[in-house]
Image (spheres, rainbow, N blue to C red):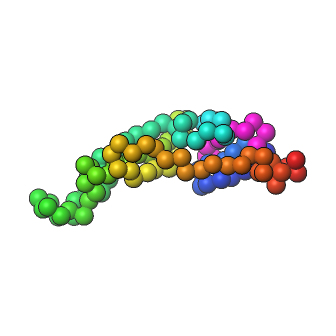
Amino acid sequence: MRVRITEYLEIDLDKEMWLCQRCGKELTDAGESYKRGCKVRERDSREIHRPLIENSMYTFSPDPDYCRIIEFYCPRCGTMIENEYLPPGHPITEDIQLDIQKLKAKYKGE
């Protein structure tokens, strides 16, 4: 049985696996962070948030010395599952921790 967790993530309660909601690709074990099963791309903040004022000290764009942007993609279909804005050197966050047994009890009556 599949349960939708986010816009692009599902969990398969029978296999206890994270899945891409778009293509059904198994990403990783549901006891781990789904991000371990994703393709990861680090982006330059100036590439995404173009400076509003050129050649100025204040550009309204995140400074890459203080902000890095990490994107997580499904390895099969390429759907962007998540992104994070983190300070350089900060570890990737583990943002979802599920109680799989309680989900099984709720959806399957176990």
Name the residue nearer the viewer: 7 or 87: 87
- Secondary structure mostly seen in magenta is loop
Where residue 32 sits in the image (x, y, percent)? 61, 39
Which residue ends up furthest to the front in the rendered image?
90
Quadrant that contains the N terminus = top right
Q: Residue at x 75, y 36 (%)?
A: 15
Instruction: Please name the residue shown 53% across and 41% down the image.
Output: 35
Res 63 → quadrant: bottom left
Note whether 46 is above or below 34 in the view shown.
below
The residue under the point 58% across, 41% down is 33
Say whether residue 25 is visible: no
For residue 29, above or below residue 55: above
Residue 99 screen position, x and y as percent: 72, 49
Rendering coords of residue 103 (x, y %)? 77, 51
Of residues 23 and 93, the one drawn nearer to the viewer in this rendering = 93
Which contiguous range is marked in magenta? 13-22
> Along the line of sight, which residue is nearer the eye, 24 or 40?
40
